[in-house]
Image: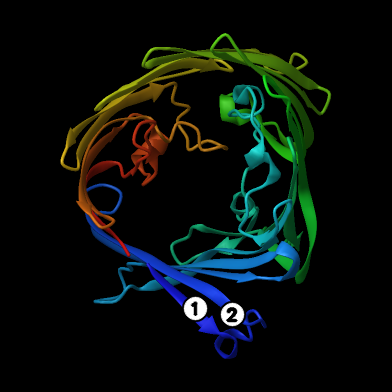
Amino acid sequence: MKNILLSSAAIALLAGAASAEVTWSGDAEIGYNDDVEDGFYYDAGLYVNLSQELNNGWTASASLDVDLESSSDDTFSMGDVDTSDWVLSISNDMFGLSFGDVDTAYASFSGVSALYDNDIFAPNDGADDYEDMYVTGVDSDGDDVYDGATAGLLLTATYGDFSAAASGIVIDEYELDTITGYYEASDKSNGDIEYGQLVLAYDFGMFDAALLYAEDVAFDASGAGFGSETGEEDMVVLSLGAAFAGADFGFSYMDYDADVTGFGIDVSYPVGPVTLGAYYVSYDFDGSVPEDDAYGVSADYSDGPITVAAYYEKVLGEEEYAIEGAYDFGMGLVVTAGYIDGDDDGSTGAFGDDDDFAAYIVAEYDLGGGASFLASYADANSVAAESTDDIDTGVGGYELNSGATLALSLEF
């Protein structure tokens, strides 16, 4: 990582002040995968963060990622070059305003998540979730090309034990071409702010409370196999939490377009190195969905070099269960293995459900200095997981390719 202090002459166009801090970092990976990647793959990234102190305790900052990915059409070059994750922000000890690839207000909300975040509906927690809203054509391979959000806007505020967050998404104006069947941008320079979200929270000590309002949350009944009804409706969730006698308790109530309401409760309790958890959710879909409840149990163990996690849940009639564990052998070697499975709906799913179902084993060796070597094998248990490079593990936080993978990762 390089820290560079530039003079005002060098960064006048960026900050217009006496000095600014610019931080550079990067990473690179080369690997082999016999399934998703069909052989060798490589990529690299360059990350730049800019920061400038302003008057009266304010700080301006910006960040940008430059992504380099291998391409089958290029030899001894990185091929495709793309930029992502750009954010421009200004903040002080109480307020923050960010524009770009930001989190939404929902990302700061917590409650009984199965109630309002499931295979039928779920608020989006990032501006990038709105990128692929309109099909604007097809590429040379016949795959759909998408477009949508320009950026997100996030405002945060804290005062004592009170916190608030508000967000919106800048959406370009699109119109459907009835002849081609694709959407065309009618205005790419002056998009409206849509999909507003608001979160208010207060910490009372032993108790806490939070309120979520999310505008136009997508509804897709096919996500749980209940027909093809789709739409967008507003959602309100109230959550209360309490901590006493060593246990954490939570209660949430949801109102989703009046026709869908529900409540949920959860509890977690530590017993030595084990933490036990359970939740129950009851929905009222006004008779449109035959399965109207959800429940789950979990157990997590962590002591010395051993970590184990297991859970079982049934949400809207679909089961999911897993057992995962890791052992730290010391000297930088950690081996992680697990089995994640459940009811496969046979598709990729409207909300990406079932794409983590797999049996896997990972051996990772820390080479020091941000470098590591990984060997993994993931045997997909669902249609969605068979063709993904994003099989998420609950232990270790890995994003695995389906199939066998060898990879060397470097950080700079």
Residue 33, disc: none
Question: Which of pointers 2 and 1 lies earlier in the amino acid sequence?
Answer: 1
Taking the spot 24% from the left edge, 27% from the top edge, the residue there is 305
**Rendered image coloring scheme:** rainbow
Residue 351 in which image quadrant: top right
Examine the rendering and report whether any part of residue 33 can be seen: no
Read off the residue under disc 2: 19
Residue wearing tag 1: 5
Q: Toward the viewer: 50 or 101?
A: 50
Q: Quadrant of residue 284?
A: top right
Amino acid on which the number 1 mark rests in the picture: Leu
Where is 45 relative to 317, above or below? Answer: below
Residue in the picture at 39% in, 44% down: 390
Specify whether residue 184 is in view. yes
The secondary element bearing badge 2 is classed as strand
Q: Residue at x 29, y 54 (%)?
A: 37
**C-beta proximity under 8 Å, tags 2 and 1:** yes
In this rendering, the answer to whether 347 lies above or below 173 is above
Percent position (x, y) of residue 375? Answer: 19, 44
Q: Residue 143: horizontal and vertical position, in percent?
A: 49, 57
Q: Is residue 299 rendered to the left or right of residue 193?
A: left
SS for callout 1: strand
Near-viewer residue (371 or 246): 246
Q: Nearer the viewer, residue 240 or 342?
A: 240
